[in-house]
Each structure stands twice: as structure tokens, then as C-alpha cells.
Image: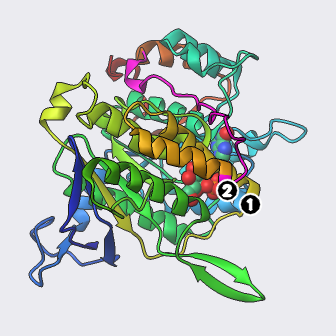
Amino acid sequence: MRLADSFRSERFGAVRIHELQRVIELDSGAVANSGLPGLSGASRVITPDALRAIETQLVIVVPCMNESRSVIEGVLSGIPHDCLIVLVSNSDRGPVDRYEIEAQTVEQFCRLAGRSALTVHQRDPGVAAAFKAAGMDELIDDDGLVRAGKGEAMLVGMALAAMTGRQYVGYVDADNYVPGAVHEYCKAYAAGLHLAESPYSMVRISWHSKPKLREGRLFFSRRGRSSEVTNEWLNRFLAEYSHFGTEVIATGNAGEHAMSLALGLKLRLAGGFAVEPFEYVDLFEQFGGVLESAHPDVMASSVPVLQIETRNPHFHDNKGEEHVQGMRMQALNVLYHSAVTLPAVRQAILDFMVAQGVLEVGQQPPRERIYPPVGTLALDLLYDALDAEAQSFRQLDGRAAAGLPAAPPIDRHTIPV
Ligand code: GDD
């Protein structure tokens, strides 16, 4: 893969946000000098070997709620072979058990492709028991189950990823109609994680276009309806500190993103669709140098955030305007309530929300749920309880299925504690 070089970055404490880098070539051949500036200048080649080295350490979590089987199959086919797949579902269990269909889809795919995977249902009572045992009561709702929400699914996925002992976790949505796009996102994660010169790195995708039907013709829209608003406010947050306008953040809502687990396990994740914008906010809170950091090791290093503009169109299920408006407001809620957001920005957010008709004058934006870092969980206890109590929890071992010695994705003896 060849990426355009990123010449500029903005710093906020230890967080270094790189300007958007375009994918120049999806496949740049097997030239040497991976990661070094290209001979032609202005670009970097990441060789297949370098990509593969990251992919063998990469877990791809697929949050899934009531998506169709054929779309899920396409998504699975796009995830590079060496990545480990983790499907976290919140699909209906009745009248038709959609999770069972999804788990079978993953199982069949793994059998055909000689792959390994983990699948679990977020609302399985055994999963709630496991997170309680591991020390995260905050995740449990009044029914005694893990809360519904995409952020919650991502948290469950990150905990499973951490148990595998791999070094990186990435996310791809289950409703993506283009397997080639999924493939490109995963390659871009590997490329970015390879280029990032820090153990605490994050890669976020900005897709090039989203196809839409307008008056019977295809139109390739450049910006997401939610991202436009989220990016603008995150950039205003930065500008209020630096006194310089900026457009550096292009991935505030990026559902497609990856990070090193060394970073991910320290992040607090937010619930629902606040999860992606809050990743930025939490980076600013924990590593921005405004508040005291609990991680001097990270502060002494740096937290690069690489943003990569991919080539494939992002073609996914359209869930309607109300859904998008909800997402936009969740982003503003977390920014409004952050301890590092300066008063002028906070006031401007209030005015904007009132003008949008989502708040009355004098009202405060609601607070989103913020969970403790996954790194605070007792992973050994989590595994034991999952294994004993979560009936939906499946470990698919591609090696055993191929008649080779068993190598389940999680080895109880090597779970990091
Ligand atoms: N397990 C689980 N639990 N999965 C969920 C849940 C949940 O409660 N809610 C949604 N999902 C899954 C969906 O099935 C889909 O695969 C993915 O999470 C994204 O959810 P969508 O409802 O399709 O969101 P979207 O496509 O409108 O928004 C996506 O893009 C935004 C950026 O444009 C999401 O990835 C957002 O998080 C992102 O900000």
C-alpha cells in the first residue's frame, strides 16, 4: 500500500493529530524500505510483509445488530486472513434467533477459510455476569444485562481482543455492502499502525465518498452528515486553545478505526454512538497535558493519531435522519461535558443545540455514559466466567478445524493479568 505522506500535524499535549493522508495505491508492490519516504518523495510504501506483520497481531471487532446474512458474509470476506475476527452481536434472539444465524455464518466462513474467530451476544446474561466478575458493574443495566449500544459492543470486543494477547484492535461495521472497502480499511489500519512511531497509536479512516441515490442518479457525497458537525466542533475545541483555526480533525465520527491495545486499554470508552468522538475527547483529557495524566509513560512518548482517506466508496445501510441527528448530538454532549473544553466552546455548543431545536434555553445537554478503561478489568476472571456462563460465547479454532493441533484464539494460560 502507498500512502501520501503526512507533512503536518497538530499537537495537543502528547496527542499528535496527523493531517489526512490519502491512499495513493492499494497495492504498491514488494519494494524495499517499508515506511521510509518514497523515492518520488511525498509518499510512503508499506510492503506486504510489513502489513502482514501487523495483521497477525490485529483483532478486527465487528459490532452487529440485525444486519443481513449476505452483508455479514461480505464483511467477513474482506477482513485479511491473518486478522482475528470477533463478532459482537446485539441482534434479536426471537422470534427468529438472528444471533444463531450470524454465529453459524461466522463458523461456516471460518471452516471454509481456515480461520479463527470469537463470537458473543452482548445481551447474554452470562456476558453480564462475566463483566461483573471482572469488575465493570457500570456496563450492566437494570435488567442485569450488558447495556445495548455500539460503544458497549466495542468495549466487549476490546476486552475479548485483550484476552487473545494480540497487540492491536480495529473495528469494522457489519452493515458494509462493499467487501473491498472492508479490506481496504483493514489494510489502512495495518499501514498506519506500521508507520506510527509509538506504542500508543491510533488510525482513523475517512472514506472518500458515500454513494447516494438522488433523483434516480448516483451521487458520491464527500462528507457524512454527522461527521461534518462533529469534526467542526472538535476543530473548534483545538482552535480555542491554539488561537489558530484548524481543519485537522477529519475523523471525529470514524466508525472504522484501529489502535494499539497499549493505548486502547487505557482509554475510557463512551456508550452508544458517543464512542468515536469521545475517543478524541478522552485523548485530550488523559494525554492533552491540561489535566494531570495517570500515565506518565504515555506522556513521555507520544500518541499519534493517523487519519487515512481510503479509496473505496463507503456504501452501507442508511438508518435515517433521526439516527444521524442522534449521533451528532451525542458527539456534542461529550464535548460539552469534557473538563478540558474551554468555556467559549461550551457556550457555543449550547447555542448551537438550542438553534438546532434539540435543547430548550436554560437546559443542559445530557451526559453520555463513560466507562472505565478496559485495562482495569480482571481479564482472567472475565474469561473464566465467560467460559462457564456465557452460552453465546464461541471460540472457533481454524487450525483444529483443519486437523492441525488445536490453537483456540484465547489461551487461558496466557491471558494478560
Ligand atoms: N453489537 C452491537 N450492539 N452492534 C450495534 C449496536 C449495538 O447496540 N448498534 C449498532 N450496531 C452495529 C450495526 O449493526 C452496524 O454494524 C454498526 O454497529 C454501526 O451501526 P449503524 O447503526 O449502522 O451506524 P451508522 O452506519 O449510521 O454509523 C456508523 O458510521 C458513523 C460514522 O459515519 C457507525 O460506525 C458510527 O459509530 C459512526 O460514527
Residue 243: image x %, image y %?
Answer: 27, 54
> Which residue is at the front of the view, 410 or 172?
172
Q: Which residue is drawn at 39% across and 44% down?
A: 280
Residue located 80% across and 39% down the image: 92
Q: Can residue 117 be seen in this view?
A: no
Disc 2: residue Cβ within 8 A of ligand 1's nearest atom: yes
State how far apart marks 2 and 1 are (Cα). Answer: 5 Å
> In this rendering, would 329 be left or right of 240?
right
Q: In this view, does 26 lie above or below 302?
A: below
Q: How is the image coloured?
A: rainbow
Q: Majority secondary structure of the magenta segment?
A: loop
Which image quadrant for residue 143? top right
Depicted 409 relative to depicted 8: above or below: above
Determine which quarter of the picture holds residue 292: top left
Residues at marks 2 and 1 touching, judged by CB atoms closer than 8 Å? yes
Q: Name the residue under label 1.
A: 321
Q: Which residue is drawn at 20% across and 65% down?
A: 8
Give residue 238's position: percent from left, percent from top.
33, 50
Q: What stretch is highlighted in magenta?
A: 355-377
Q: How crowded is mark 2: few (under 14 residues within 10 Å), some or many (20 or more)?
A: some
From the image, tell me which residue sits under label 2.
Answer: 324
Is residue 261 in view? yes
Amino acid on which the number 2 mark rests in the picture? Val
Tag 1: Cα neighbours inside 10 Å, few (<14), some, or many (≥20)? few
- Viewer-nearest residue: 43 or 186: 43
Count every numbered label the image shows and give the total. Answer: 2
